[in-house]
Amino acid sequence: MSSAAPRATMVVDKAFKIAEVDRRIYGSFIEHLGRAVYGGIYEPSHPAADRLGFRNDVKELVKQLNVPIIRYPGGNFVSGYNWEDGVGPVEARPKRLELAWRTVEPNWVGTNEFASWAKEVGSEVMMAVNLGTRGVDAARNLLEYCNHPGGSYWSELRRSHGYEQPHKIKTWCLGNEMDGPWQIGQKTPQEYGRLAYETAKAMRLVDPDIELVSCGSSSSSMPSFPEWEAVTLDHTYEVADYISLHQYYGNRDNDSAGFLARSMDMDHFIRTVIATCDYVKAKKRSSKTMYLSFDEWNVWYHSNDADAKLTPWGIAPPQLEDVYNFEDALLVGSMLITFLRHADRVKMACMAQLVNVIAPIMTENGGRSWKQTIFYPYMHASVFGRGVSLQPVVNSPVYDAKDYTDVPYLDSAVVYNEAEETLTIFAVNRHLEEALELDCDIRGFEGYRLIEHLVLEHEDLKAVNTADREDVKPHAAGSATCDDGYVKARLAKASWNVIRLGKPRN
């Protein structure tokens, strides 16, 4: 170990604006998968259940995350889902074989219940329509059921189900991962592009005020990427407002330095999609800019072996229940930082998922709920990352990993909230052995003082949280100081940092 800690510098000025941060980049996702719904948000027999069967303890944790939008009901699930199964009297709803995850779907929770729950936790709904086994007709009918005030067949059916007022769902996904061979009703790019265009056209006739998300590639590793984007957008460019991106990362080789560099892959993915969108824009001579909806992202690999051993056709089995460790939280922090650095084009993002299924919140059936390690960077970014994303000028020492070169030890983003007169620096120190000294010039923010320096750190990269013990949690004893427009901080080795500054209020 060297005698002197490595040093990074940063210059922050309010003139260096990337864009206003769309609050919806802090969205999440609930799919009818595993215990996300049943045993997660909904458990009528639980002591903390409300009158509709939703767990109040889970609601309180979701509220702490300040989640602005939640994607529903899938995911792979939606490509075989008949939405009509999930409305009307619960006792009359059918149990169906759910082919995406090979379970039995009881339909105890559907569109109306979820929309009501989302409203209670302060979130909007991002609704996905089935373009796998279904298409234009089912999509336009679901939209009419959800958003039309009354006087038509589907809107009156909603009212007869006890929901007098429309749900006014604004954001709609045109299918899910339609290029994936695992997807029910997989499409070629030409097939999907035509279907998505016709579906969008019909939906906009029902409700012109909605916004639509066209399916991008299922991940950047798909053989069809980015050709899929180029071909499908040739059809959907003028009718969609966003294109979706999905990406998960894992550390199966136990290469922590390489794992923490994977946000560089995410950055490359985003830049490639932006370039493809702008190519289609130029090709069409369009004045419209396509925005990005990164509506599935997370770490996902811990539960793969356990999932392979599950017996099919159960109701809400424990699927995709990753137990997250400390290094996972660091990468999640870097992924959030990546979104902030692309705030000009990434306008929505959904951590997949919210409860139990690759999630920041875990529950026991009939028992406790708790925060996974990844809960904290997600919460910090959502709560403190509202405002304008700034482009800092950063000079950081770098390292080489197996798949990446010149990886900066300092991974950072900065958000300025002019209305509240606050400045927040989000920073990950990727160095696994040494602290990083940070010198930050904020002289353009006259009169700003340190509010707090939050730190998430742990000696063991593999440390986890359980229902019995929360080993990984933040503290407010960070070393940052602010004097005469200069911030100095020592960022602990392998740490997530939130340095908050602001003007004192009289």
Image (cartoon, rainbow, N blue to C red):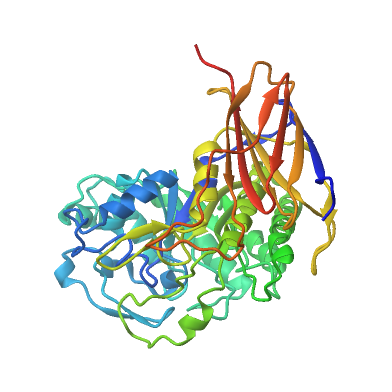
Between 148 and 100, the one lying in front of the other is: 100
Classify the position of the N terminus by image quarter: bottom right
Res. 215 in view? yes
Rendering quarter of residue 416? top right
Q: Is residue 280 left or right of residue 415?
A: right
Where does residue 365 sit, x and y in percent of width and height?
28, 68
Residue 14, above or below 30:
above
Residue 462, above or below 152:
below
How many discs mark residues in the rendered view? 0
Residue at image coords 52%, 67%: 195
Between 271 and 368, the one lying in front of the other is: 368
Q: Farthest top residue? A: 506
Q: Is residue 217 left or right of residue 132?
A: right
Q: Is residue 74 left or right of residue 442?
A: left
Residue at image coords 48%, 50%: 27
Between 120 and 228, the one lying in front of the other is: 120
Res. 395 in view? no
Residue at image coords 49%, 57%: 471
Rendering quarter of residue 417? top right
Where does residue 172 sit, x and y in percent of width and height?
45, 55
Residue 309, above or below 505:
below
Where does residue 19 sit, x and y in percent of width and height?
65, 35
Residue 264, above or below 148:
below
Where does residue 33 sit, x and y in percent of width and height?
39, 71
